[in-house]
Image (cartoon, grey):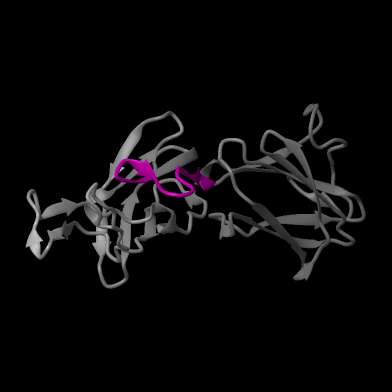
Amino acid sequence: MGSSGGTGSFLPTHATPHELRVFLNGALVECCPMFVEVFPDISRILYSGIAPCALGSLVEVLINSNGAQSRGVQIEAVSPSGAVIPCEVDVDQRKSSFRASFVPRVVGEWQINVTYGREHISGSPFTCYVYDPTKIKLRTPVRYEAGRESQIAVDTKDAGWGKLNLLLELNGRKLPVTCDERGDGLYVFSFYPPHNGSLSLQLSFNDNQIKGSPFYIQVVIHPRSMPTRFWGNLCNIIYIYIYIY
């Protein structure tokens, strides 16, 4: 170190306060020791994200701390309307991770804010889609006619974001199905029942079976009355409305 002073450097290995001592000719200089706060590299704090979750279910947020101390971590859940729900952070020292949870009461796109020292970690805020399978509406005719192209409509408008799957079986044999996404949460499935029998309709949303599924509808050869159109003018159409509760 010269007459005008000098510089030094060190590489901290732990995110904890460090005591700094400076010696000159073997003697501790005035104002030492000093204390330096060392924060973790927030870019190394990892979060795997959240899969779509059902309304009213417990949503858990699990974060790999990579050495960060819990006292600097804050997790908030922000509803689609902007309401903020602070989440209590639990620490698992053995796994070097943080855990928080909340229960969403509103369908829609939630934001998860994860901050350390009031600074967002990499990727924050994160998105969590909340859906309500009880809002799905299934619409079908009373019966289907064998040998005619047929349709089923599923309305997911009020259910939130999700992946819809439909499986049809006639007397235990799978039927080919095509899907037409009409927009605004409306899906129309088309199929061709080759003969009469019992039609099984299995419906799932975000890979979860809808309550009441499978539903059963008869396919007949000569029905007394059949709809000429499926979606639009309802004058000559008879429907079963199945609401999932």
Q: Does 172 sit above or below residue 191?
A: below
Question: Seen in the image, is 231 located left or right of residue 147?
Answer: left
Q: Nearer the viewer, residue 5 or 162?
A: 5
**Residue 236 appears left or right of 216:** right
> Residue 35 location, x and y as percent?
15, 52
Residue drawn at (56%, 55%) of the image: 212
> Is residue 85 left or right of 241 when viewed as pictured?
left
User: Is 87 or 245 nearer to us in this picture?
Assistant: 87
Q: Is residue 218 above or below residue 187?
A: below
Q: Tell me, yes or no, whether the highlighted magenta stretch contains residue 109.
A: no
- Look at 92% across and 55% down and name the residue there: 147
User: Magenta stretch?
Assistant: 114-133
Q: Position of residue 54 (x, y in %)?
A: 47, 50
Q: How many marks?
A: 0
Which one is in front, 3 or 56?
A: 3
Seen from this angle, which residue lies furthest right?
147
Identify the residue at image location x=61%, y=36%. 157
**What is the quadrant of residue 170 in the picture?**
bottom right
Image quarter where the N terminus lies is bottom left
188 or 114, which lies in front? 114
Q: Residue at x 40, y 57 (%)?
A: 45
Furthest toward the front, the residue is 3
List the single residue furthest toward the bottom.
94
Task: Please identify the quarter of the rendering in which residue 11 is found.
Answer: bottom left
Q: Let me know if residue 21 appears in the view.
A: no
**Coordinates of residue 241 in the picture (x, y in percent):** 64, 40
